[in-house]
Amino acid sequence: MIIFICDDVNEDALQLKSIITDSGFNARIEIFNTGEGVLKHISSSKMPDICFLDILMPEKDGVTIAEQMREKGYGGHIVFLTNSNDYAAQSYKVKASSYLLKPPDHNEVTRVIRELLDALKAADTAGVLINSKKLSTFILFKDIAHIEVSDHKIYYRMKNGSTVEENARISDIAARLQDRRFAQCHRSFVVNMDEIYQMQGNKVVMNNGKTIPITRYYANFAKTYIGYLLEEDT
């Protein structure tokens, strides 16, 4: 999870960062003291999942920054930081997800982030476009159980039991699956860790009953999977 905090008072930004970190969320947190810094960053880099914006800032207020973020295509969550609860109308205008009174309360910050994480999971519309000679098919990451390669073909095994086929190499697919739920456990298999039923030594059993081996080359797979589970529990 990527979180931006924009507050012209650096001590306030650091306090909020400390609360988020101490709450156990697995997040990369970046602090900006001006709205312009946020705008430049989202134009040239990966956009954040959640952006905390102080409403009262000297150069550009948080609402103006939020409007410009939306104009640049930012569709993530915006949470306003304010000393007053009189900004409901402005929050609605820019489709803000919530606002927090300053100084931020630990429990309130935790509650808001958990709610937004639940919303992000529910919205889960990330996927990949599969090209074949006959047609192109867009499939959602959440619908993939696992992926396997055989005879220079990639087979996307879907949770509903169907298969989508593509002429490609497993290395090509790994580069396109930029999603933390996927991990490779074998040179011929990439699994959706959400679909693992259990690990049994050097193999995983998927929810669909498929047993997939874990080879020594991918011995760090177990560590990756455990880290993923711990991240999901936060």
Image (cartoon, rainbow, N blue to C red):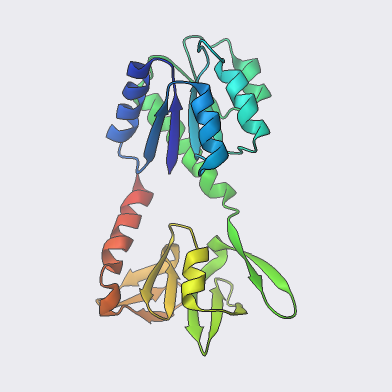
Note whether residue 95 is visible: no
Residue 9 x/y as whole percent = 39, 15
Q: Is residue 61 left or right of residue 171?
A: right
Q: What's the residue at 59%, 48% (across, down)?
A: 123
Question: Left or right: where does residue 69 sit relative to residue 189?
Answer: right
Whole-percent x, y for residue 171 in the image: 46, 74
Q: In the displayed image of the protein, which residue is found farthest to the right?
A: 134
Report the front residue among 208 and 3.
3
Quarter of the figure with residue 119: top right
Q: Is residue 161 above or below residue 56?
A: below
Residue at the image point whose x is 52% and y is 90% from the top: 151
Between 117 and 15, the one nearer to me in the picture: 15
Residue 59 visible in rendering: yes
Q: In which quarter of the image is the N terminus?
A: top left
In the rendered picture of this protein, how many numbered marks are placed on residues?
0
Tell me which corner region of the image, top left, top right, bottom left or bottom right, holds residue 129.
Answer: bottom right
**Vertical arrangement, residue 127 with respect to residue 199, above or below:** above
**Which percent across, then down, holds residue 220?**
26, 67
Q: Position of residue 61 (x, y in %)?
A: 56, 15
What quarter of the picture does the C terminus occupy?
top left
Point 43% across, 77% down: residue: 189
In the image: residue 70, left or right of residue 5: right
Please report the residue visible at 26 percent of the width from the left and 62 percent of the height from the top.
223
Relative to residue 140, is residue 233 depicted above or below?
A: above
